[in-house]
Amino acid sequence: MRSIKLTIEYDGTAYHGWQVQPNARTVQGVIETKLAQITGERVKLIASSRTDSGVHALGQVANFKTSSSLDARSFLRALNGLLPEDIRVKDCEEVDEGFHARFSAKRKLYEYRILNGEVHSSFYRHFSWFIPGKLDLARMREAAMKLVGRHDFSSFCSAGSMHKTTAREIYGIQVGRRSGFVVIRIEANAFLKQMVRNIVGTLVDVGRRKLTPSEFGAILEARDRRKAGMAAPAKGLFLVKIHY
């Protein structure tokens, strides 16, 4: 059996997340259906991250096993010819049989976009969280730096997580402005359920001066989800890149 690696971009607005679910339209389900048409096989996609309903991807990675003789370029053309416009395969390559999109990953980069201004945008309404009031980015950066390193992120893990441990290592976190957006980028070895959205929601409380950076640090140390802020809306979150 051959192993094929896909790098995928998608607008998650119309999907109930990545992972196949009964009676729900998912990104994985749509791609697997098209792969079955191409290969004549029942194909199982393994993804680097199982993005939630409404979350987008610029660089999701998935792999599948196949006995098809089609080369990678033919898979790329065939898939993009069948997939809906809100899903695109950006790259396709044959990889070693031992490659695993999830377990072979070393680092993952997510980005969250907040449209911070007086008026929301008709174009970006599905791709950002609109916050009209001023955000204090200096305070948000100070708070965010407390997350760098290896910590127990229980305070930022939503209920229903199936992970064996809530310890994760954040390698870097950036809070800045870009073309009218406040952009928060977080790179880590792995993420817990809704971890980025919970961090962003709590950082926004710091930016609104509802919390101090010291109080944000205390929330991290508390290891209690009830202490943290709301989860930021899914529509502002993008899976940017997976490092192997």
Image (spheres, helix red, strand yellow):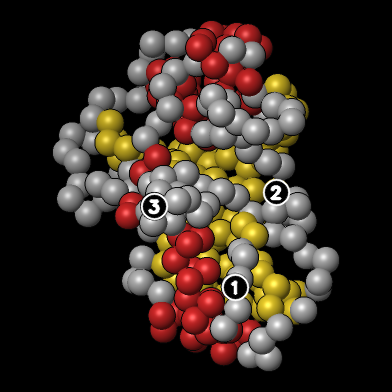
For mark 2, does the 10 Å Cα neighbourhood hold few (<14), some (14 to 19), or many (20 or more) residues?
some
In this figure, which residue is indicated by the disc labeled 3? 23
Amino acid carrying label 3: it is Asn
Amino acid carrying label 1: it is Arg
Residue at 35 percent across and 18 percent down: it is 208
Residue at 59 percent across and 12 percent down: it is 224
Determine the image quadrant of residue 221.
top right
- 110 over 68 or under it: above or below: above
- Kindly indicate whether the residue at mark 3 contacts the one at mark 2 (C-beta within 8 angstroms): no
SS of the residue at dot 2?
strand
Residue at 72 percent across and 24 percent down: it is 151
| Front one among 229 and 40 | 40
Horizontal and vertical percent position of residue 12: 39, 54
- Quote the CA–CA distance across marks 2 and 3: 32 Å
Determine the image quadrant of residue 132.
top left
SS of the residue at dot 1?
loop
Point out which mark residue 107 bears: 2
| Front one among 229 and 193 | 193
| Front one among 191 and 206 | 191
Q: Nearer the viewer, mark 1 or mark 2?
A: 1
Q: Is residue 194 left or right of residue 148?
A: left
- 119 over 211 or under it: above or below: below
Point out the image quarter for the C terminus.
bottom right
- Quote the CA–CA distance across marks 1 and 2: 30 Å
| Front one among 80 and 216 | 80
